[in-house]
Amino acid sequence: MKWFLIFLSIASGIIGCGQGIENIFISDKLTVIVQELEKETEINIKCSIVLADKLPDINDITGEIGYSFGSVNLILLKDTKINDPDFSNAQKKALIMHEIGHCQFGLDHNNDAETNGRPISIMHQGISNYVYTDTSWEENRDYWLQDIYKINEMKD
Ligand SMILES: [Zn+2]
């Protein structure tokens, strides 16, 4: 039995490599949201997303609730924020895609905004403040994700 399990894990590792499946970990609390995001954006998320009670201390509005370690494909999100009932699913999606922009696509911040204050990119540091409802996320998503979509197409 033991050897069979070892064989299975080796075989699945080989299959995993061959098909380019990434070994990533997504916190249980975010698996549904991440699945929805992958479906609606057609982007395969390739960074692990882990909840943490403490994040590196940096001067970044979004960074207070999310942090990306691009070199190891790891995103940390502040667990008190993810567990906060006032932090909506739409805000979680905006936060996750902002961190994916750093972690997976190597993007820096873009704090440009329109005259009415609406950010022009998901890479705005205060992005999760500009979206609350699912409808608002759906209306803004494609506009905010333009840079990510361009890079993602180039990778295909
Ligand atoms: Zn950021």
Image (cartoon, rainbow, N blue to C red):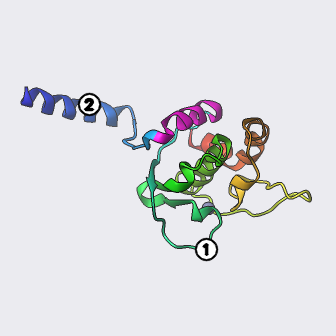
Residue 118, visible in the rendered structure:
yes
Quarter of the figure with the N terminus: top left
Q: CA gap, disc 2 to disc 1?
A: 42 Å
Indicate which disc residue 59 carries.
1
Image point (61%, 74%), residue name: 59
If the image is split into quadrants, where does the C terminus sit? Answer: top right
Q: How many labels does the image show?
A: 2
Looking at marks 2 and 1 on the same chain, the residue that comes earlier in the sequence is marked by 2
Magenta-span inclusion, residue 38: yes
Which residues lie in the magenta part?
A: 29-41
**Disc sitting over residue 12 in the figure:** 2
Inspect the image, locate mark 2, and give the three-letter code of the amino acid beneath it: Ser
Label 1: which secondary element = loop
Secondary structure under the numbered disc 2 in the rendered image: helix
Q: Do the residues labelled 2 and 1 touch (CB within 8 Å)?
A: no
Is residue 114 shown above or below 43? Answer: below
Residue 77's x, y, as percent?
Answer: 51, 55
